[in-house]
Amino acid sequence: MCLGVPGKVVMISNENRTALVDSFGVPRWVGITLVPDVEVDDYVLVHAGYALEKIDEGDAEERIKLWDEVLEAEEEK
Amino acid sequence: MGKRILKKEEEERARLLMYRDRQLSRRILQRVKRKGQELREKLGKSPVFMEVCGTHTVAFSKTGLRKALEELIDLRSGPGCPVCVIDYGDMDKIIALSRLENVTIGTFGDMFRVPGSHSSLEQEKALGSRVEVFYSPSDAVQWAEKNPCHQLIFIGVGFETTAPMVALSLQEAEDKGLKNFSVLSLHKLVPPALRTLLTDCDLKVDGFILPGHVSAVIGREAFDFLSQEFSTPGVVAGFEPVDLLGAIDNLMGQMLEGACQVDNNYTRVVRDQGNRTAQRVIKEFYDVVEKSWRGLGNIPYSGLDLKEDLKKFDASKRFPVEISTPNIPQECRCEDVLTGKIVPHQCHLFGKECKPQKPVGTCMVSPEGACGVHYQYDNN
């Protein structure tokens, strides 16, 4: 039940605190009250029709890089 | 210009999709297997890890990781499926509400087939009750607005992840001036359940894989008590194969090094202190109260009731219903499955009297219940 879907904010409607979020090609208006500082082009995690949290893309990339380094070092042994 | 934008988007998507990259997952799996072997030799047995999130239960099976790791870890499911831990009495209350004149029950799809003592919403709908399934509580508010002659009672189930969304839907109903929308709050909180599990149950859990989206709301720090008070390590995890393997790798690493802490492996979404706005919403709309959990019994401060000043939206106050003592199927062992004492196939109803088509207990009926998931993905 705690399923969350990532998506990119395409448009923000400040009037009713919603945003159009594109989840890998599927667009949907979602509530953004819980992510007050969200901006267009941000990635968010959507749960039950509301953005639950912003996704830190830099962090996402960093962790994958770290995995690569760790695994490469191990595999060379 | 257009091409450049598309390329940027493709790169961004690729970055997020790396967490389900097969080759990377395979490489991490090899590392986890090596570590697992080492740990088994050290302990003389497989470590017991527990996930406490229905979405993790599904992810471990669907990705094939449960099978791939079965020789090395004893992976249990805890009380992490909100539908599974619904008390029989609460389900009977929902059924009684669905039978009221002029009432429509609004619910997440997961609840539709959950059995109460004698019936389910699915059966009640077949008998003439009105039941609407919604993806979002916000959709339920819009339905109520379009159908002013019906009283819509939305069933608020779910953990900390979902409670703020249901609260915000009440705000929407208030803003629209709706008088035909109310909520039956059955929301529950994860940390008190883990505390009860660690205090009362005989099972020795060596490490917890912690629910990513509950943690997005309450923060990693909310689970520090696991290591500090119970000397049990934990790791907050996402839901892709790289996330799941990373979590197992982390717990194995902690055990091998003799470390014991609550780590965050889902930092792209989860902050140490969680989402403060969501926490404020929960505080503003709900009181923390004792709730009854299937499998764990009554747990103090483990659930959320709507605050007194929201009683006009509180279905339990607006539509009081009487129910008789719940009738609990004696042979069903959902309670033991939910506390990780047994794995699904150890229940002798599993796959025989109890199947997804004709479930006896909640763990078989919920799409995220351990029994249903094992039956669908891991049953040989």
Image: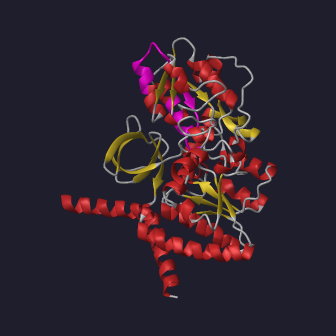
* Residue B181 visible to the viewer: no
Q: Residue at x 75, y 23 (%)?
A: B325
Which x, y percent locates residue B295?
72, 41
Q: Please indicate whether residue B152 sits to the left or right of residue A42 in the image.
A: right
Identify whether B233 is placed above or below B197: below
**Which is more toward the observer, B35 or B179?**
B35
Q: Position of residue B284 (x, y in %)?
A: 61, 35
Write the start and end of the magenta stretch as one range: B142-170
* Image coordinates for residue B21, horizontal then vertical, percent: 41, 65
Asked if the magenta segment contains residue B238, the reply would be no
Q: Which residue is rendered at x = 48% and y = 74% of the image?
A: B27
Residue in the image at 52% along x and 17% along y = B127
Q: Residue furthest bottom?
A: A77
Quadrant of the rendered image containing residue A65: bottom left
Work out which residue is located at the far front of the displayed protein and give it.
B352
Q: Which image quarter holds the C terminus of chain B?
A: bottom right
Q: Position of residue B235 (x, y in %)?
A: 62, 61
Does any portion of residue B172 appear in the rendered image? yes
Residue sitting nearer the eye, B349 or B55 = B349
Image quadrant in which the N terminus of chain B is located: bottom left
Above or below: residue B265 compared with residue B337: below
Q: How is the image coloured?
A: secondary structure
Q: How many marks?
A: 0
Query: B180 or B285: nearer the eye?
Result: B180
Q: Is residue B168 magenta?
A: yes
Vertical side of B368 occupied by B273: above or below: below
Compare residues B293 and B361 and report the one nearer the observer.
B361
